Image (spheres, helix red, strand yellow):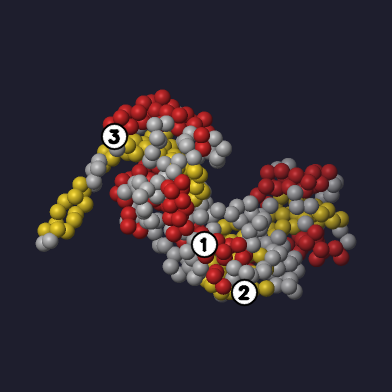
Amino acid sequence: MKVYIIGIGMDGDKTLTREAEAAINEAQLLIGAERMLSPFGHLGKELFCSYLPKDIAAKINSCGYDCGAVLMSGDCGFFSGTKKLLPLLSGHDVKVMAGISSAAYFCSRLGISYEQMKFVTLHGHSSNIAVNVKLNRLCFFLLGGDMTAADVCSRLCEYSMGDVIVHIGADFGYPTERIISGKAAELTESHMDGLAVMITENSEALRHIPSAISDEEFLREKVPMTKSEVRCIAVSKLNICTDSVVWDIGCGTGSVSVEAAYRCPDGKVIAFDKKAEAVELTAKNARLFGCDNIAVIEGECPQSLADVQAPNKVFIGGSSGNMDSIFAAVYEKNPKADMVVNAVSLETLNETVSCFEKYGTAPEIVQIAVTRTEKLGSHTMLKAQNPVFIISGGLS
């Protein structure tokens, strides 16, 4: 059977391409959600109302027609159901036809170029809003699920970005189409429900991935901190990917969590500490640095590790004497995780190496001794910091 998968644009009428219109006229069967089918009900074709890939494939396989068309909103290549449907139609002659996406339509209405825009879907996600706005001058958010435009604005305010410019659009191509703009702090009570999207403009977005952030920039109090130069090397050894899940065990102030979070804006960091003051401070620093992809859990490890998402990368800044059981818990969750451990004593170094040999591969060991300068009168003196061992490697 010949099957067209068609991106019908915003409303299936004004933004429909001529190629797509010809394919719809050729098809004997039209499939899609009710909103997709309604503009074509007058054509006298069989209409099958569904947006579920398995139901669509089953209908195509059993219909007996020579040609059918599956109608997708917007563009088939932009957060579309096309991706899940294509593998189910491998026995048919399938042609995908591009449409006009909500992003292209919205940007044209605003006069914004989108070649350097970060695209984020909030369908089923809610933890990667502020961090992406922090790292990108322009972000497009496809809203959905429980996250409304007002919720996104509130999140930006919570993470110190209330001055970011926000554009909210809803019901594109329909008589009820609406577009509003303003600062995030001004739109926390906005009511833009329905088929809504959002674009953020952050003129103060970071143009680099922060590394070795100055210790003085963090809220400190009396909680232990992995110092700037040591933190820089330890995080680099993890080789964090943009979608990694990172565990920070013994998070302290959360300085490692923050630098890791900037490296996985499409992933998350789960920070653990047994001390309530450390958990609270890590959460404060996450908000200060705009990292809403950091989740903080209070409790002893390894007990706290049991019911959380498996990690790709693990940093251990403090084990409270439970190094072996922590390694065992990580190995059970993901036997291929990459791990980095900081040690300030020979005993911890020896214990860590033994754990790597037991659960993983022979680790790389680096010892770093940082010396900073300090002004005393007219002289500049050298002030040595405690040496630290950085032990890194993969599990088997």
Against 31, residue 57 (above or below) is above
Residue at image position (60%, 56%) is 121
393 sits left or right of 94 in the view: left
- Front position in the image: 122 or 20: 122
Mark 3 element type:
loop
- Front position in the image: 60 or 316: 316
- Quadrant housing residue 150: bottom right
- Quadrant housing residue 7: bottom right
C-alpha separation, residue under disc 1 versus residue under disc 2: 21 Å
Mark 2 element type:
strand
Residue at image position (47%, 61%) is 134
Residues marked 3 and 2 touching at CB (< 8 Å)? no
C-alpha separation, residue under disc 3 versus residue under disc 2: 58 Å
Residue, far left? 378
Foreground mark, 3 or 2, reads: 3
Mark 1 element type:
helix
The x and y percentages for residue 352 are 36, 31
